[in-house]
Amino acid sequence: MKPQNPKPLALSGGVIHYGYLLALFFITLSGFAQMPIFKRYYIADIPGLGWLAQFFVTHLIHYLSASLLLGIFLTGQANTC
């Protein structure tokens, strides 16, 4: 009996598309937050947006978004977006 090759994990195009857009949004937002723009122009004083002024939080979000984008590109799923 021949061993069967396992099928690769296939996600639907919608999941990849929205994951790509979400990662692109957060990598852009956290990239601007690495500069003190949000604190300087008092955007971080708006309730719920105080995390934009915290460097290490935005740094972590930036790295997580970048790893998600790299994962999408390296698996070849970016052409479904």
Image: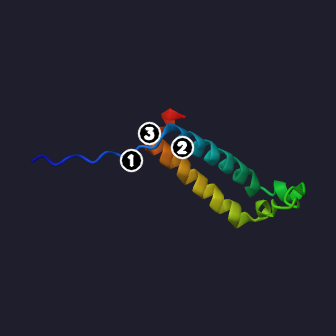
Foreground mark, 3 or 1, reads 1
State whether residue 25 is above or below residue 62. above
Q: Which colour scheme is used?
A: rainbow
What residue is drawn where x is 79% and y is 62%? 53
Q: Residue 9 carries which label?
A: 1
Q: In which quarter of the image is residue 59?
A: bottom right
**Label 2 to label 3, Cα distance in Å?**
14 Å
**Label 3 to label 1, Cα distance in Å?**
12 Å
What residue is drawn where x is 88% and y is 59%? 46
Residue 36: x percent and y percent?
81, 58
The front one of 59 and 51 is: 51
Amino acid identity at mark 2: Val
What residue is drawn where x is 60% and y is 57%? 63
For marks 1 and 2 on the same chain, the one whose residue lies earlier in the sequence: 1
Mark 2: few/some/many CA within 10 Å (<14, 14-19, 20+): few
Q: Quadrant of residue 34?
A: bottom right
Instruction: In the displayed orientation, state which residue is furthest to the left.
Output: 1
| Residue pointed to by mark 3 | 76
For marks 2 and 3 on the same chain, the one whose residue lies earlier in the sequence: 2
Amino acid identity at mark 3: Gly
Secondary structure state at the residue bearing disc 3 = loop
Amino acid identity at mark 1: Leu
Quadrant of the rendering where the C terminus is positioned: top right
